[in-house]
Amino acid sequence: MLGLGGLFVGTGEFASMSLLPSLASDTNVSIPVAGGYITAYALGVVVGAPLIAILAARWPRKALLIALLALFAVGYGLSAVAWNHATLLGARFLAGLPHGAYYGVACLVAAAMVAENRKAQAAGYVMAGLAAANVIGVPAATWIGQAFGWRGAFAALAAGGGLTILLFWVFIPAIPRDESVSARSELGGLKRPQLWLTLATASIGFGGMFSVYSYITPTLTEVTGLSSGQVPMVLALWGTGMIVGNLVGGWLADRALIPAIFAIMVWNAFFLGLFSVFASSTVVTLVLLFLIGCGFALVPALQVRLMAVAGKAQTLAAALNHSAFNISNAVGATLGGASIAAGFGWASTGWVGAGLAVVGVAFFLVSIGVEKRFTGIGKTAA
């Protein structure tokens, strides 16, 4: 059930990217300007994740998950009836508010159910809903959007949110709240430098995937030469890579967390760069998009890294992880759009993505260096 909720929430995040050309056309803006719908959603996640985690720190987790899905349904209902650029921007922002808190709380619930050495895999199973969105949800939403318009796709997501609320009510057990948790204890985690360095790694290092994904539809049709009807199949291939990466990433993180994070980011930089080189080749592009999708392995790995460095601020850290990934969404979409608008072409988003991945590696190396330094100081003092 937790994965099913993640499927709908994840479909909502990625569907607007595949529907971007029609969103731009119907709201009378260019495609790079329409990238603001992606940015608005991402900013909603960035704002909503920490705010909800703090204000609802003592809520029973089942009730919190249901409330988050209700907000999701409202956001997509309003997106379906938006009448111009400004109102759609506002609706997309509202729809993004529950995103980070949902995945954060769901991952904590899953991790609490398993042994210590399986926490990353448990988080990976929850996040598999987000990955599966690109195999099932996004192709379905894209098809609905092509057949009935983007309003129909957003309305279907609102209905899916309502259905999931009913399923949660029936099937999700009551999860006892942690009486030691409070808004104050959650905020206390913000004093930890490793928390911020890990968030910076996610915010920048994962932006490369979104740089490419945000403009994948026009890139495939204008550069690779595919038809718009073939795009949902390609998105499903990308999503398959995400599922594989998500499950493998959780397995690797449970065995060697730090090396796994480093290796995944290097992987992303390499294959994102290759995408720009081979975007005109259909076969190579399909292979590369699957391999880029596998880079989603970074999500469960960084989720566990944050849980390890957050102390008692577990809910806030878990939610902030998704704020960080949606900062990367905003950064990737914005820089990718800027590259296209500057005349570098649709395929230039791969170079932008590779550059962001390299910067993410640099942040992570700083994080490890700081951790080793303070660990060394602690040992010397002892």
Image (cartoon, rainbow, N blue to C red):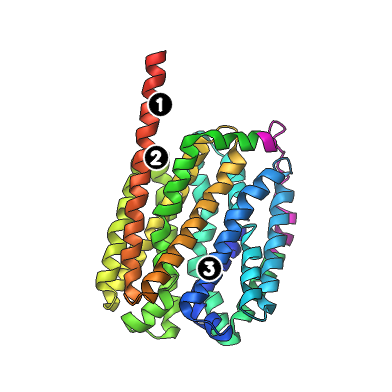
The amino acid type of the residue labelled 3 equals: Ile
Residue 39 is left or right of residue 256, and the answer is right
Q: CA distance from mark 1 to mark 3?
A: 39 Å
For the C terminus, give its image quadrant.
Answer: top left
The amino acid type of the residue labelled 2 equals: Leu
Q: Residue at x 37, y 50 (%)?
A: 360
Q: Which image quadrant for residue 113?
A: top right
Q: CA distance from mark 2 to mark 3?
A: 31 Å
The amino acid type of the residue labelled 1 equals: Phe
Q: Which residue is mark 1?
A: 374
> 155 above or below 119?
below
Along the polypeptide, which appears first: circle 2 or circle 3? 3
Q: Secondary structure at mark 3?
A: helix
Q: Which numbered disc, 2 or 3, marks the residue closer to the eye?
A: 3
Picture coordinates of residue 22 (x, y %)? 53, 83
Q: Residue at x 40, y 70 (%)?
A: 338
Residue 284 is left or right of residue 104, and the answer is left
Crowd tier of the residue under label 3, counting other residues whose Cα lies within 10 Å: few below 14, some 14–19, many 20 or above? many
Crowd tier of the residue under label 2, counting other residues whose Cα lies within 10 Å: few below 14, some 14–19, many 20 or above? some
Q: Residue at x 35, y 62 (%)?
A: 353
Q: Which residue is mark 2?
A: 257
Q: Which residues are magenta?
A: 163-184
Q: Which residue is mark 3?
A: 38
Q: Secondary structure at mark 2?
A: helix
> 309 above or below 242?
above
Crowd tier of the residue under label 1, counting other residues whose Cα lies within 10 Å: few below 14, some 14–19, many 20 or above? few
Residue 2 visible in the snapshot:
no
